[in-house]
């Protein structure tokens, strides 16, 4: 070859080198940014190598110089890509699955949602970017609006919130509740264990903004609205009434269920229905059973079976064992509820003389904002009992209300020991009956530490679709949150050193490891008002500064000063049964007399 031929060779080698680098770049793009397999490069590479070999055998040097740069990208890309493919297959876990799922060029691309992407980042990290599901409404939680962190709204989209005192968890809950109430016109039920006047004022403003009634149940407030949690069939009323002592007093729970079932059936048959809590607590006393027998004796013949059952039950009630059990059970129920003499569960008298109380079914249908102030700090047992009764009432109301509703369990850790079972039940009921539940507690550790129920945290977590985590200082809580929000796989490289660690030998190893998507230490560094938001079906966890909801100071519609409201139902006015004299005795006057007794 002459000088020109040597120049041509050099030029050809330069072009071949450039196309080879292009081939490697193509392999990188195919591996990191597409679902196409590197194997798509194998066939063109094989054809190029065969053509080059054939030209060399035929001594067709001009053809060989043309074939070489044309084959170089396929060969270089195929060789480098094969090495990466073998490494990915050997990595196991999701990287192996991702590599095996790659497709040939003629196969259709996998079906994905608009905006969904799956690609590899540096260190072999497999990233699956998922856009917010179009079917799930959401509320923006930051000043960035729809472009920032968000939480889901709607049926079954339960949210778990944690945060130390003052970290901002109540601010987050208020924003979520306001969005659900104002945009989806859902009734709102709040179990507020702190009974904070600021929370009450905020819920008043929310009800006024939504144009719905505001209902406040507060055992410490003489102007409290009147709650009627006893409704439905006699069996359901009996079971719901003794629900607050189910966990703490299982023996008395069973005895009272049996006794109240008889009592409720008699009251129902005698049109003394529905009873108020003061009346039902009064009828628990075995000394009042003669009055029940007297009412049963006055029933017509169609209630003959019930009358016989009452007489048989009298043998147990009048026995020493029955008197001991029922007296102890009635006392424990009254102590647990702490409601027998309180205005909150005493029917309200309207100007027309009707005895009425708020029933949650009607409140749900009217999209009302209903708030219980339980005063858990000063009355922990009564607060737990009220919470259990409220959850039991709402659980049954959701089945018949046929309307969207939201439940906020604020400071749930204060009552979780008694209310744990009902808490899980209401989460499950909400998934199929238009409900969204927001559970707020100070620490992840509260769930099992306060309830003494191992596995409860996992059971609750399986029902949540989103978690909003404010500052957590407990190492156990931080570790749990980090694990719950997931991990990602990475290649971890080690380098062999020489000269006592002063230099690298050029040799090393690589192994597949996993690291948390959100490090545990992040949760301890969150400022007040900051949180990490995690959505099961949405994008990766994100750190965000929560934007407080702003509501103007307005007064909402209230009930309790005029005729029966649409949120109220008629209640039987008696708070105690008329005393009945025993045979051969003069009946003592009732200590529970009331001018409304009929």
Image (cartoon, helix red, strand yellow):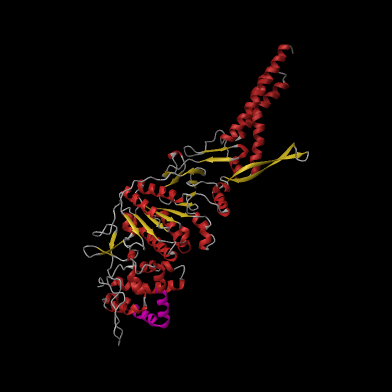
Q: Is residue 359 left or right of residue 246?
A: left
Whether residue 177 is in magenta: the answer is no
The quadrant holding residue 217 is: bottom left
**Which quadrant of the rendered structure holds the C terminus?**
bottom left
Place of residue 571 in the rendered image (x, y in percent of width and height, measured from the top left):
28, 66
Q: Name the residue located 49 percent from the left edge and 43 percent from the top edge.
A: 544
Q: Residue furthest left?
A: 352
Place of residue 563 in the rendered image (x, y in percent of width and height, measured from the top left):
23, 59
Relative to 20, say whether 375 is above or below: below
Relative to 45, say whether 278 is above or below: below
Specify whether residue 456 is in view.
no
The segment highlighted magenta reads 308-330
Depth order, front residue of 408/25: 408
Q: Name the residue located 63 percent from the left edge and 28 percent from the top edge.
A: 23
The quadrant holding residue 370 is: bottom left
Q: Residue furthest right?
A: 499
Q: Name the residue located 42 percent from the left edge and 79 percent from the top edge.
A: 324
**Which quadrant of the rendered structure holds the N terminus?**
top right
Tell me how many marks there are: 0
| Magenta span main SS | helix
Place of residue 329 in the rendered image (x, y in percent of width and height, measured from the top left):
41, 74
Relative to 294, say whether 483 is above or below: above
Depth order, front residue of 110/500: 500
Place of residue 206 in the rendered image (x, y in percent of width and height, measured from the top left):
35, 49
Q: Name the residue located 30 percent from the left edge and 67 percent from the top edge.
A: 274
Q: Is residue 526 left or right of residue 498?
A: left
Depth order, front residue of 365/90: 365
Q: Is residue 561 left or right of residue 540?
A: left
Specify whether residue 86 is in view.
yes
Q: Residue furthest bottom?
A: 584
The quadrant holding residue 84 is: top right
């Amino acid at each position: 070859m002459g000088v020109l031929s040597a120049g041509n060779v050099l030029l050809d080698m330069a072009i071949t080198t450039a196309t080879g680098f292009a081939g490697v770049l193509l392999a990188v793009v195919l591996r990191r940014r597409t679902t196409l397999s590197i194997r798509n490069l194998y066939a063109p590479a094989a054809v190029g190598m065969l053509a080059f070999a054939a030209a060399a055998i035929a001594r067709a040097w001009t053809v060989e110089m043309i074939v070489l740069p044309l084959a170089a990208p396929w060969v270089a890309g195929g060789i480098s890509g094969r090495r990466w493919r073998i490494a990915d297959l050997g990595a196991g876990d999701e990287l192996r699955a991702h590599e095996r799922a790659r497709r040939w060029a003629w196969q259709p691309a996998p079906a994905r949602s608009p905006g969904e992407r799956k690609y590899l980042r540096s260190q072999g990290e497999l990233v699956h970017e998922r856009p917010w599901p179009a079917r799930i409404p959401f509320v923006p939680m930051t000043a960035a609006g729809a472009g920032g962190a968000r939480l889901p709204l709607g049926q079954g989209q339960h949210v778990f919130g944690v945060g130390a005192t003052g970290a901002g968890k109540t601010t987050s809950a208020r924003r979520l509740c306001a969005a659900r109430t104002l945009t989806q016109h859902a009734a709102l039920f709040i179990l507020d264990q702190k009974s904070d006047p600021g929370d009450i004022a905020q819920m008043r403003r929310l009800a006024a903004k939504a144009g719905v009634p505001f209902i406040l149940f507060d055992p410490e407030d003489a102007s409290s609205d009147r709650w009627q949690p006893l409704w439905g069939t006699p069996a359901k009323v009996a079971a719901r009434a003794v629900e607050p002592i189910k966990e703490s007093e299982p023996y008395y729970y069973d005895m009272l269920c049996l006794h109240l079932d008889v009592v409720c059936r008699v009251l129902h048959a005698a049109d003394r229905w529905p009873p108020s809590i003061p009346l039902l607590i009064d009828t628990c006393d075995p000394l009042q059973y003669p009055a029940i027998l007297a009412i049963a004796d006055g029933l017509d013949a169609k209630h003959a079976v019930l009358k016989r059952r009452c007489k048989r039950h009298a043998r147990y009630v009048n026995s020493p064992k029955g008197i001991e059990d029922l007296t102890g059970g009635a006392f424990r129920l009254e102590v647990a509820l702490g409601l027998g003499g309180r205005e909150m569960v005493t029917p309200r008298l309207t100007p027309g003389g009707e005895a009425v109380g708020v029933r949650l079914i009607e409140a749900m249908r009217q999209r009302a904002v209903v708030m219980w102030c339980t005063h858990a700090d000063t009355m922990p047992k009564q607060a737990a009992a009220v919470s259990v009764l409220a959850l039991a009432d709402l659980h049954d109301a959701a089945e018949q209300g046929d309307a969207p509703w939201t439940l906020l369990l604020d400071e749930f850790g204060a009552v979780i020991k008694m209310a744990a079972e009902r808490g899980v039940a209401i989460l499950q009921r909400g998934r199929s009956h238009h409900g969204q539940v927001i559970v707020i507690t100070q620490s992840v550790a509260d769930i099992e530490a306060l309830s003494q129920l191992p596995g409860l945290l996992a059971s609750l977590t399986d029902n949540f679709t989103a978690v909003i985590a404010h500052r957590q200082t407990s190492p156990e809580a931080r570790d749990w949150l980090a694990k719950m929000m997931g991990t990602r796989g990475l290649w971890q490289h080690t380098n062999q050193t020489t000269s006592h660690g002063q230099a690298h030998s050029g040799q090393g190893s690589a192994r597949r490891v996993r690291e948390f998507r959100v490090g545990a230490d992040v949760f301890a560094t969150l400022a007040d008002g900051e949180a990490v938001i995690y959505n099961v079906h949405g994008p990766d966890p994100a750190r965000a500064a929560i934007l407080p909801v702003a509501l103007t100071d307005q007064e909402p519609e209230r009930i309790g000063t005029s005729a029966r409201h649409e949120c109220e139902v008629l209640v039987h006015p008696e708070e105690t049964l008329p005393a009945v004299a025993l045979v051969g005795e003069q009946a003592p006057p009732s200590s529970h007399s009331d001018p409304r007794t009929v």
